Amino acid sequence: MSTINVLGLVLLVLMVLVGGKAGLQSFLALLLNFGLLFLAIVLVAFHFPPLPVTLVVGLLVLALTIFMSSGDDLSSTVAFLASAAVLVLLVLLIVPVEHWALVQGFGPEDSEDLEGLSVLVGISFVQVTTATAILSTLGAIAEAAMAISAGLSEILEQHPQVTTKALLGDGITVGKQIIGTTFNTLFFGFFGGFLALFIWFTGVHYSFGEILNDKIFVSEILMILFAMVSVILTVPITAWVMTRAIAGQRRRVAKAQNDHEN
Amino acid sequence: MQGLLKKRRVTLGMWLLVLVVGGLLVWGTQHNAGLYRDPIMQVTSVQTGATTHEEDDFHNADRQTKQVLHGHILNGQYRGQRLTVTNTYSLSGAMDQHYRRGSQLFVVVHQHAHGLTATAKDAKRDTPLVFMLWLVIGLLLLIMQFSGFMAFLSVAVNGLLFLIAIMLNGSTQGARVLWIFGSLAVVFAALTLWLVLGANRQMLITLGTTLGGTALSLLVALIVFHFTHEKGMYYESMQYVTQLPRPLFLAETLLGSLGAVMDESTDIISSLFALKRERPELSAGQIFKSGRQIGSTIMGPLINVLFFIFVADTFPMAMLYLKNGNSWGYTFSMNMSMGVVQSLISGIGIVLAVPLASYLASRFMEKKVHA
């Protein structure tokens, strides 16, 4: 058996042992997310437009990740709506910045890997790189939205009469609690992946100015920064969506009571 | 009411201040050519030339266009000199740039008897980089205030440590990469948790879980590697490798999972401390059970975060492989398999940290937690 299969099996067994049914569901979500990511790559290779493909795949990934992990209905719905809104905002930010920064495709550091490959494939790499940046932040958006909405629904459980204005403030407070560790997850996750690249820069003695303008370096740092912006934006947006959902719920309850009294 | 109005005006002022600073930064990086040693050219006009159609062996059609860029040098000994540079760009643009009027680019200047000629080297990219950095810090401070500042501080300190470790790795020719980044992981975790939680018992328990979970995941990985003889792992597919790939891969995985495991154990353990504060009568067994419950809801999304960071990055190269007539299986092996292995190892660490955090918290929490 190959290493990937055995490691996957170990992960599956551990997730079921620790989390039971929820663990099994999370494992399935992970598997499906991989399938979706691969599907996106194949579709783009078949000349489907990269941005619409990314948006559709992104929404599916968010839905899978959020609805397949155990949470109550209200917090899952709020987390999904909020993360979808963040995804759209993020696209509006990433598309112009990627056009501006000219970091599409590959850099001189990739030339060894590109040997024997034709790069003139007729697909816009600006859009492919944009899609990459959007996809790499999906996990972080889903996680942050779920953390905020779960925290808020816990507050609602304990203080059912909290005003929507106070709830918005509570959302920011929950956000303040998670932002430090979430940033570190992103920092270590990305820097772990770029370790080889950074070692390359010091080994080949790039000057500071060369690194700051290097295509690959700028592209990778922009990806971290996009992920950080998306996590920051997720906090107020999730809190706001939660207040709208609660306000709607209370209106419906009040109306039902009125109808009942009449 | 008076106080409220005053407070509002202050925050409005802060937003304005952040905007002005951002504008200055962007303007500044567009006029910082003097800081660079390599000559930078500002494009003032562009002539677009002929477009040719290209087709490769795999029937990929593309278009290449020639352009002539007119402009002047912004810095150095050739400052102010007018130049003309020819450039070719393609529709796909994987390895070339489409320059426009107003673009700034690095050029290599050749001096001849009858004047200067130059070739385009690469675009100048510091302006968008600084802009995004400003956006992150600005939003962080405006929305999260002090907590945002602390989050930024811990990332900045970790970045600095990371830089020092890379220098250290370079000076030892990469021979001790796993030791360097292994000990760095301990320092990273201790420092970050100290910044987030302060020096107390909760921080020690969280630190123990973080280090234990990460170490256990590497141990499990090494055992699996041993029994499967690393079948299906293509170290040669790793990008930008300049030293022995296997220890480098392990160091990358170690760092990658450290942050997520730390995130998770902080969440679980602080929730358990809060629980104990509210209901001091809970037994160690009950605490353990709650910890497992909290952990099993957050582990899935966290594994997802790392999965997308590790694997989405391979999108452009994987697509290129497919367009060059490679099979799905080969494309996966050569581009995505190492990222998937990394995600799986990190996932194992994240899952193992759940019982570890619950056990350590239930065992070493004080009988009465002080608020």
Image: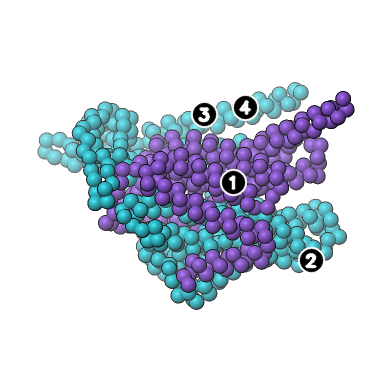
Chain B colour is: cyan
Chain to which the residue tagged by mark 4 belongs: B
Give the percent coordinates (x, y) of residue B13. Answer: 61, 27
Which residue is located at x 79 percent, y 55 percent? B275
Chain to which the residue tagged by mark 3 belongs: B
Q: Name the residue under label 2.
A: B285
Instruction: Tell me the SS state at disc 4.
Output: helix
Foreground mark, 2 or 1, reads: 1
Q: Report the Cα–Cα distance between label 3 and label 1.
A: 39 Å
B67 or B91, nearer to the observer: B91
Foreground mark, 3 or 1, reads: 1
Give the percent coordinates (x, y) of residue A131. Answer: 44, 44
- A51 over B269 or under it: above or below: above
Foreground mark, 2 or 4, reads: 2
Badge 4 amino acid: Leu
Q: Name the residue under label 3.
A: B20
Which residue is located at x 77 percent, y 31 percent? A252
Q: Which of marks 2 and 3 is nearer the N terminus?
A: 3
Q: Report the Cα–Cα distance between label 4 and label 1.
A: 36 Å
A60 or B200, nearer to the observer: A60
- B11 over B125 or under it: above or below: above
Chain to which the residue tagged by mark 2 belongs: B
Give the percent coordinates (x, y) of residue B345. Answer: 54, 64
Q: Do labels 3 and 1 share a chain?
A: no
Q: How crowded is mark 4: few (under 14 residues within 10 Å), some or many (20 or more)?
A: few
B245 or B196, nearer to the observer: B245
Q: How crowded is mark 1: few (under 14 residues within 10 Å), some or many (20 or more)?
A: many
